[in-house]
């Protein structure tokens, strides 16, 4: 699953640590989400979406495998 977390974070001018604190996870979790090594849980995806004032599907891009 691809995502726009790094892009949105940079536009907002915040660090991974600041985003992590805002959504109550570690900086390492944000790093893993941004690099695609970890897929955010539904609850965390909602927190990130609320933080950026966007819908989940505007941040996380689900691509179905054929």
Image (cartoon, rainbow, N blue to C red):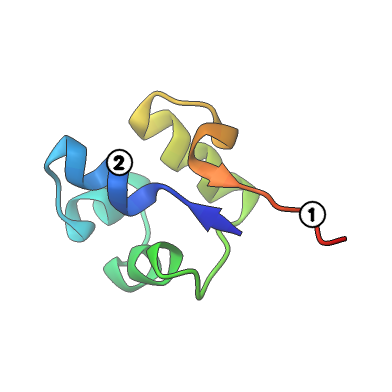
Q: Which residue in the rendered view is the most extreme toward the right? A: 66
Q: How many marks?
A: 2
Q: Residues within 10 Å of mark 2 (few under 14, many from 20)?
A: few
Q: Residues within 10 Å of mark 1 (few under 14, many from 20)?
A: few
64 sits to left or right of 40:
right
Secondary element under disc 2, as helix, strand or loop, is helix
Q: Which residue is mark 2?
A: 8
Q: Which residue in the rendered view is the most extreme toward the front? A: 66
63 sits to left or right of 18:
right
Q: Position of residue 29 (x, y in %)?
A: 39, 68
Indicate whether 37 appears above or below 51. below
Q: Which residue is mark 1?
A: 64
28 sits to left or right of 35:
left
Q: Tell me the residue at 45%/26% (across/down).
A: 54
On residue 41, the disc is none
Task: Name the foreground residue: 59 vs 50.
Answer: 59
Labels 2 & 1 near each other (Cβ < 8 A):
no
Q: Tell me the residue at 14%/46% (across/down).
A: 14
Task: Name the foreground residue: 52 vs 61.
Answer: 61
Q: Position of residue 26 (x, y in %)?
A: 32, 67
Q: Position of residue 20 (x, y in %)?
A: 29, 56
Q: Tell me the residue at 44%/64% (across/down).
A: 33
Indicate whether 53 appears above or below 12. above
């Amino acid at each position: 699953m691809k995502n726009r977390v790094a892009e949105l974070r940079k536009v907002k001018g915040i660090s991974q640590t600041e985003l992590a604190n805002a959504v109550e996870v570690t900086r390492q979790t944000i790093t893993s989400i941004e690099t695609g090594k970890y897929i955010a849980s539904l609850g965390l995806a909602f927190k990130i979406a609320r933080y950026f004032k966007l819908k989940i599907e505007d941040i996380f891009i689900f691509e179905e495998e054929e």
